[in-house]
Image: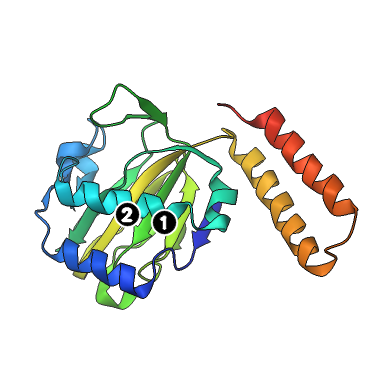
């Protein structure tokens, strides 16, 4: 599954985040890379215990629940606190696959990474390069837009040769572990929502909604 979520942030919210990130204390992103990924990673990140990262992360998490399309696609059970990165001056991240399990900082809990998310803070015309390439699909979205994709996908960030690319990224453990099952549920939900607009009084809507919830009941893992 790959899904673009437009306008996760309003222009005012986006400007607030961008202004804060312009003053951020960036660190070498290789500090958070695994032993295999460290040689492929050349970017900057905010430390996970940076108060700004925690403040902006909580703000982004609050926005996720207000976007029904995102919730329908991801069916989130747990979300790792968002992180923040910056690519400039040739910064890049070569081909890699995200870790399967992440520890939640400051807690004994872990999150299985089913879905990866990138929220763009820079508009495409502000930098050259910097495309997120997932399974050969090139992604460079407007600021405030988010892309959601399978964490098991091979992906990379192309070198940024002009300007700076600011983004937030995080991982989601879904109620439904299998990507193909989530795709079926999203297609079914989309069909139910469309029929609700076209024939709101149809008794078949009740039956289809029941099918959706019975599949979710069968496939969900809590």
Q: Residue furthest bottom?
A: 125
> Which residue is painted at 48% across and 49% down in the image?
149
128 lies above or below 105: below
Q: Looking at the picture, tell me which residue is in the foreground, 110 or 179.
A: 110
Q: Where is residue 138 in the image (x, y as percent from the top left)?
A: 43, 62
Q: Looking at the picture, tell me which residue is in the foreground, 7 or 35.
A: 7
> Which residue is painted at 73% across and 39% down in the image?
213
Q: How many neighbours does mark 2 have within 10 angstroms: few (below 14), some (14-19), or many (20 or more)?
A: some
203 lies above or below 154: below
Q: Position of residue 27 (x, y in %)?
A: 10, 48
- The numbered mark at residue 59 is 2
Q: Residue furthest front?
A: 201
Q: Which residue lies furthest to the top in this view?
A: 108
SS at circle 2: helix
Q: Position of residue 122 (x, y in %)?
A: 29, 69
Left or right side of 106 for 80: right
Q: Quadrant of the C terminus?
A: top right
Name the residue tied to disc 1.
63
> Which residue is painted at 56% across and 56% down in the image?
68
> Which residue is painted at 25% across and 62% down in the image?
166
Answer whether labels 2 and 1 touch (C-beta < 8 Å): yes
Q: Where is residue 180 in the image (x, y as percent from the top left)?
A: 64, 40
SS at circle 1: helix
Left or right side of 119 for 198: right
- The numbered mark at residue 86 is none
CA gap, disc 2 and disc 1: 7 Å
- Kindly indicate the quadrant of the structure image that contains residue 120: bottom left
| Residue 173 visible, this orientation | yes
Left or right side of 26 for 85: right
């Amino acid at each position: 599954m790959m899904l673009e979520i437009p306008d996760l942030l309003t222009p005012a919210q986006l400007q607030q985040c961008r202004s804060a990130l312009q003053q951020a204390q960036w660190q070498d992103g290789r500090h958070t890379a695994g032993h295999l990924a460290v040689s492929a990673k050349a970017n900057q990140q905010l430390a996970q215990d940076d108060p700004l990262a925690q403040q902006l992360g909580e703000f982004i998490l609050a926005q996720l629940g207000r976007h029904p399309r995102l919730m329908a696609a991801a069916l989130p059970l747990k979300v790792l606190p968002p992180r923040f990165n910056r690519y400039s001056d040739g910064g890049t991240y070569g081909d890699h696959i995200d870790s399967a399990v992440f520890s939640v900082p400051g807690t004994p809990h872990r999150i299985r990474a089913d879905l990866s998310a990138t929220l763009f803070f820079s508009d495409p015309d502000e930098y050259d390069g910097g495309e997120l390439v997932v399974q050969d699909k090139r992604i460079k979205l407007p600021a405030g837009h988010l892309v959601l994709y399978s964490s098991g996908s091979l992906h990379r960030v192309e070198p940024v040769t002009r300007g700076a690319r600011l983004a937030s990224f995080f991982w989601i453990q879904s109620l439904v572990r299998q990507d193909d099952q989530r795709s079926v549920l999203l297609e079914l939900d989309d069909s139910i929502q469309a029929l609700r607009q076209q024939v709101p009084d149809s008794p078949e809507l009740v039956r289809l909604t029941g099918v959706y919830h019975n599949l979710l009941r069968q496939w969900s893992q809590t």
